[in-house]
Image (cartoon, helix red, strand yellow):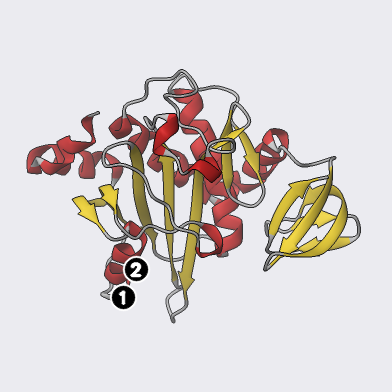
Amino acid sequence: MRLALLAIPAVRSALELELGRTIEYHVTLPSTQDRARELEASGSRRLVVVAEEQTAGRGTHGRSWRAPARTSLLASWLFRPAPAEPALFALLAGVAVARALDGLGVTGARLKWPNDVEVARKKVAGALAHATSDGEGGSLVLGIGVNVRQRRDDFPPDLRESATSLALAGHTVDRLMLLVRITRELDRVVDRSERRAALDEWRGRATLLGQRVEVLHDGRPAARGIARDIADDGALIVGDERIAAGEVRLL
């Protein structure tokens, strides 16, 4: 698993030139998202923070994101100016991950609103976005975690039926190549001229559209109905309601 090659300055420098980004690599880190936000606050531009292991990683709704060292792709990208609102960009990031997986032979990835990527009907990746405002268009930090080579026992018992890894799904994927492909695909979906196509692709990969669902907010039912579509800003349309945030489950 060649992500560790980024520890070699010459390799990292060559890849930085290819991707047009500064790469900060860590063997272990509390959170790539927190580190990227620290760099954002210092005025950094166009960078990606990568770690072999996180000790305090987070997913959506404040949940922890834990994985054994060297089993996942754990990275956060800084965009300045901010390319979109956080909710929309987390949604588009799912398209970028799915496209990257397609390019590495993992075809047919599906997307669950708002920010999950599924393979073999189980979650294999997720995205988390934070934005800040300033007088220059603001900035956005996007964190993505992809389960690459976990075994079933690496997942907590309560996640073993809903989460998977690329290895469990029968795929051997190099994490460094996955980092490169996701970075390139993120740059594509950032482009406003590509946004309509990306949203249409999200719809085509969606697991919930056309299904009867329940939306939970802070663990409580907030809406029920048919998930009809997503709006241009990434909100989910359930019946006649527009859902900006929450958890969704099939009924």
In the rendered view, does 67 fall on the left or right side of 170?
Answer: left
Q: Nearer the viewer, residue 232 or 69?
A: 69
Quarter the N terminus occupies:
top left
Q: Amino acid at mark 2?
A: Arg
Q: Which residue is mark 2?
A: 37
10 Å neighbourhood of mark 2: few (<14), some, or many (≥20)? many
Separation of residues labelled 1 and 2 (CA atoms): 6 Å
Residue occupying the point 56% across, 39% down: 117
Q: Is residue 69 above or below residue 41?
A: above
Residue 207, given in percent of the width and then of the height, sits at 72, 37
Q: Which residue is mark 1?
A: 41
Find numbered disc 2 in the image and state the secondary structure of the residue it sits on: helix
Tell me whether circle 1 and circle 2 mark residues in contact (CB < 8 Å): yes
Residue 191, given in percent of the width and then of the height, sits at 52, 49
In the rendered view, does 218 fall on the left or right side of 25?
Answer: right
Q: Amino acid at mark 1?
A: Ala
Residue 125, given in percent of the width and then of the height, sits at 49, 41
The residue furthest front is: 157
Q: Is residue 52 above or below residue 102?
A: below
In the rendered view, does 186 fall on the left or right side of 115?
Answer: left
In the rendered view, does 185 fall on the left or right side of 8?
Answer: right
Q: Nearer the viewer, residue 182 or 55?
A: 55
Find numbered disc 1 in the image and state the secondary structure of the residue it sits on: helix
Residue occupying the point 18% across, 37% down: 4
Q: Nearer the viewer, residue 115 or 204?
A: 115
Residue occupying the point 38% across, 42% down: 183
Q: Nearer the viewer, residue 238 or 14?
A: 238
Asked if residue 52 can be seen in this view, the reply is yes
Residue 7's image quarter? top left
Asked if residue 25 can be seen in this view, the reply is no
Residue 83, given in percent of the width and then of the height, sits at 50, 60
